[in-house]
């Protein structure tokens, strides 16, 4: 697809961050020597982390002038949205790179409350504040010498796809360098790309398929929090009662977290064909729970309550990475 | 009144901005450093499970996730009332040491160092990591990549993931270390020591031996007399993972030494409506605005600050360089310790001394027989409901403060992160540099713009934590406008 361009000029590649942590850029750096290969085949035209092209430089490019843009970070502010739309116009292929751009990631847990509730917690109620005038950041502030402006903090975190048209998705928080390397190889080969809307750099199944722990198809009577027990190093974590999201999470990472005795928290998002990761997880839990073994009173309701008591934060447990992308998307109203 | 907008980031991704106002004569009337970005962790972490915080807060920053992961794990030790067994503690500090070496390496060779190694007035296309490699040779470039690679490998091996590790738990670490892994860690630590010594030699040969650079290092342009903050062990030696927080005055005299639990007695945060980032200051001294001196509560927390609060370094090679550092600036000893160095550009040198310390410390920890003990975590037996954890992030003291209900569900989260400590000093350094460099009738050249940029680069601002922009070489665009907003002149500095 891009090979033809190389005969004349190298195709342009860009990588941009919106509301992100920088981990996606570090994942690119962690390709180590492979970066030189990318440099040999692409002209990295825009990447605040590595090169100094400005926004004006992007604006000056012809529409669809960039072959591929890897866009990471969620859309949290007005400016994030503006950059998303600009890069869409300038790119032949726009990739939502990493969990924030793909599904909102942890900052999307903000969608359980409003922008003004955030302002109150952070600038009015925080215990270390000394803020007698109850000042909060404002779009425009007059100072002695003129006016200072800040971009709007939206009420809701959105995914890239919710503000513009996206061609491909690369999941992960951040994507594992090995998987990024596979995508780079795909681009370098100049092979036809998969259908629009495909997830690249990951599998189609679940983390359980690449986890080396032993499964015995055990039925359990309830759950434990991770601080409550030291798990057996070889047995399935879910079957030990830990809420391991592997069963509802796309494979591709290599099952890294269970290897160090920690449950999968779901950073690769829902498996192929599943819209809502949290709903999938809850459905999966239903199939391994045995109410008869649950603690609590004699009634079924008591036992259900006892099971739910071990999951005091459903949103943060089942939608840690995917709330913005989920069916609910956040608190309604 | 004219106005200069130095927009190093908004024209790229909008996470940082400098506004300089000029008076009618063309001198600087005032300068503002704005942080126009917020994600709101302190709010959306409310309602989360306390034990999830090491994984959640690492997403504050993908550049220094290990710092948030460790501060969070320590806060959880307190919240759950459980102390890690010796091996759990040693593994945490070992991972943290590997992280420090990698992080300081990146800053010296790719971010801050190019200003010195290739020079502040070198062509912008040379003032970057590639220029550094051309100046010092491709072998060194390879050594820099190798250093990053081996330390990231150590972090992934012990922490589960190379970026955003997961193994920190209340009461310790989720995985033990094997003997073959210890052998590998010993080798990594030894290579780190060699690389740190080599880096200090580079600094000596290229910076200290060059009169022009040495003059810049001691220039008043980058000098501020403020309080300094850093963590020290029980012998007042710098420690990155654990200890007490020590604050010394501009004269080097200890103001206070406090346990992380008492941070609210000593630290307060000021709010300005023109920036999303708060301004921490010393509560008892008070917020007096963006000013130096012992009457102002402004403090600095950085590699330079950590050396300034320490009586000495805990490892022999780093101690040798520590002494050389203070001798070079002619610092007198008062009460057995060196007076502070106030020249902020010396932060680059201090960072390399810390890299050496972290390397030596990593070797000590890898040699510790307890490292390979299978007992790496203890299960908590209670929920205390409040936990405060502190570590030294590479860019300054990092404090995580959590409160929870009886189920361990968070009800309050307060975070004072590394770069945030330095928000006021960075603002002051930018203003000082702007005042010193932008004068009536002076043409703002590329070299001048770069010197303004050096004023914040020396703090290695981890804007991923504060504004989510990765520290990096930033292009500068300076728009000089009239008070009415008319564009008078545009100055650009491209790579």
Image: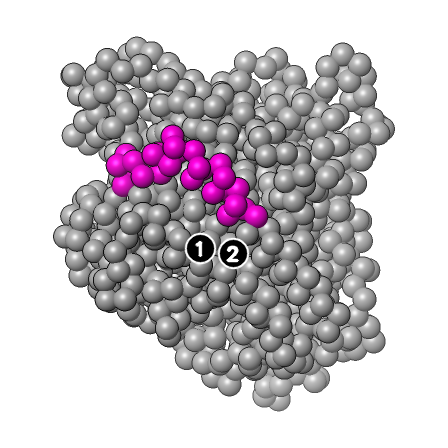
Toward the bottom, the furthest residue is: A298
Chain letter for the residue marked with disc 2 in the picture: B
**What residue is at 47 percent from the left and 75 percent from the top?**
B77
Does dot 2 land on a helix, a strand or a loop?
helix
Range of residues picked out in magenta: B198-223
Chain letter for the residue marked with disc 1 in the picture: B
Residue nearer the viewer, B114 or B23: B114
The residue where tag 1 is placed is: B321
**Label 1: few (<14), some (14–19) or many (≥20) C-alpha neighbours in 10 Å:** many
Please state if A240 lies on the left or on the right of B18 as rendered.
right
Specify the quadrant of the image occupied by residue B276. Answer: top left
Q: Is residue A176 visible?
A: yes
Query: Up-down: is B243 above or below A156?
Result: below
Q: Are marks 1 and 2 in contact (CB under 8 Å)?
A: yes
Colour pattern: one colour
Q: CA distance from mark 1 to mark 2?
A: 9 Å
**What residue is at 54 percent from the left and 74 percent from the top?**
B89
The residue where tag 2 is placed is: B356
């Amino acid at each position: 697809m891009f090979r033809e361009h190389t005969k004349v000029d190298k195709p342009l590649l860009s990588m941009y961050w919106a509301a992100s942590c920088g981990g996606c850029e570090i994942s690119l750096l962690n390709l180590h020597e492979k970066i030189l290969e990318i440099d040999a085949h692409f002209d990295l035209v825009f990447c605040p982390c590595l090169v100094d092209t400005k926004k004006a430089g992007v604006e000056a490019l012809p529409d669809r002038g960039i072959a591929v843009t890897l866009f990471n970070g969620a859309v949290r502010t007005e400016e994030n949205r503006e950059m998303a739309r600009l890069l869409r116009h300038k790119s032949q292929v726009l990739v939502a790179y990493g969990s924030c751009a793909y599904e909102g990631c942890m900052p999307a847990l903000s969608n359980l409350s409003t922008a003004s509730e955030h302002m109150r917690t952070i600038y009015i109620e925080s215990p270390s504040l000394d803020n007698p005038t109850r000042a909060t950041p404002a779009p425009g502030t007059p100072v002695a010498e003129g006016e200072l402006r800040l971009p709007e903090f939206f009420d809701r975190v959105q995914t890239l796809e919710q503000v513009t048209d996206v061609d491909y998705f690369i999941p992960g928080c951040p994507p594992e360098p090995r998987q990024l390397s596979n995508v780079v190889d795909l681009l370098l080969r100049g092979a036809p790309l998969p259908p629009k809307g495909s997830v690249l750099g990951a599998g189609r199944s679940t983390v359980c398929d690449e986890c080396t722990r032993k499964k015995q198809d055990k039925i359990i009577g309830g759950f434990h929090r991770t601080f409550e027990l030291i798990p057996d190093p070889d047995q399935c974590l879910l079957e030990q009662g830990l809420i391991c999201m592997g069963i509802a999470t796309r494979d591709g990472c290599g099952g890294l977290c269970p290897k160090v005795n920690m449950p999968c928290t779901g950073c690769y998002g829902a498996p192929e064909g599943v819209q809502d990761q949290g709903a999938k997880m809850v459905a999966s839990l239903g199939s391994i729970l045995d109410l008869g073994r649950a603690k609590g009173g004699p009634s079924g309701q008591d036992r259900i309550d006892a099971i739910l008591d071990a999951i005091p934060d459903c949103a943060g447990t089942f939608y840690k990475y995917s709330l913005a992308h989920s069916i609910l998307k956040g608190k309604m109203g | 009144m004219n106005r200069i907008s130095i927009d190093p980031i908004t024209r790229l991704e909008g996470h940082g901005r400098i506004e300089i106002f000029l008076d009618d004569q063309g001198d600087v009337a005032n300068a503002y450093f704005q942080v126009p970005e917020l994600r709101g962790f302190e709010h959306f972490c409310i309602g989360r499970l306390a034990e999830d915080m090491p994984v959640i807060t690492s997403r504050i920053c993908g550049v220094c996730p290990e710092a948030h992961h460790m501060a969070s794990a320590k806060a959880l030790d307190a919240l759950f009332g459980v102390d890690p067994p010796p091996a759990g503690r040693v593994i945490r500090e070992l991972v943290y040491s590997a992280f420090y070496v990698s992080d300081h390496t990146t800053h010296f060779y790719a971010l801050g160092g190019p200003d010195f190694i290739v020079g502040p007035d070198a062509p912008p296309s040379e003032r970057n990591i590639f220029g550094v490699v051309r100046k010092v040779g491709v072998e060194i470039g390879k050594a820099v990549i190798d250093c990053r690679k081996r330390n990231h490998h150590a972090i992934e091996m012990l922490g589960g993931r190379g970026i955003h590790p997961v193994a920190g738990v209340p009461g310790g670490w989720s995985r033990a270390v094997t003997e073959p892994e210890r052998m590998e860690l010993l080798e990594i630590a030894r290579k780190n020591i060699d690389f740190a010594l080599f880096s200090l030699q580079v600094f000596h040969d290229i910076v200290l031996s060059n009169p022009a650079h040495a003059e810049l290092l001691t220039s008043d342009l980058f000098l501020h007399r403020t309080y300094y903050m850093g963590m020290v062990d029980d012998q007042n030696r710098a420690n990155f993972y654990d200890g007490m927080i020590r604050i010394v005055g501009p004269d080097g005299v200890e103001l206070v030494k406090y346990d992380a639990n008492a941070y609210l007695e000593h630290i307060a945060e000021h709010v300005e409506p023109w920036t999303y980032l708060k301004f921490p200051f010393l509560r008892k001294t008070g917020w007096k605005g963006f000013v130096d001196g012992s009457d102002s509560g402004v403090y600095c927390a950085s590699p330079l600050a950590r050396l300034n609060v320490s009586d000495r370094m805990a490892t022999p090679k780093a101690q040798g360089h520590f002494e050389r550092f203070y001798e070079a600036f002619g610092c007198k000893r008062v009460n057995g310790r060196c007076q502070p160095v106030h020249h902020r550009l010396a932060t680059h040198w201090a960072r390399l001394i810390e890299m050496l310390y972290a390397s030596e410390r990593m070797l000590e920890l890898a040699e510790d027989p307890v490292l390979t003990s299978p007992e790496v975590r203890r299960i908590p037996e209670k929920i205390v409901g409040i936990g405060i954890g502190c570590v030294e992030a590479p860019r300054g003291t990092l404090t995580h403060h959590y409160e929870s209900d009886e189920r361990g569900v968070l009800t309050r989260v307060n975070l004072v992160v590394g770069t945030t400590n330095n928000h006021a000093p960075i603002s002051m350094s930018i203003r000082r540099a702007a005042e010193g460099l932008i004068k009536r009738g002076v043409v703002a050249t590329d070299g001048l713009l770069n010197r303004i940029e050096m004023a914040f680069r020396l703090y290695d601002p981890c804007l991923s934590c504060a504004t989510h922009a990765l520290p990096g070489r930033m292009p500068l665009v300076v728009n000089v406008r009239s008070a009415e907003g008319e564009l008078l002149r545009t100055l650009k500095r491209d790579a």
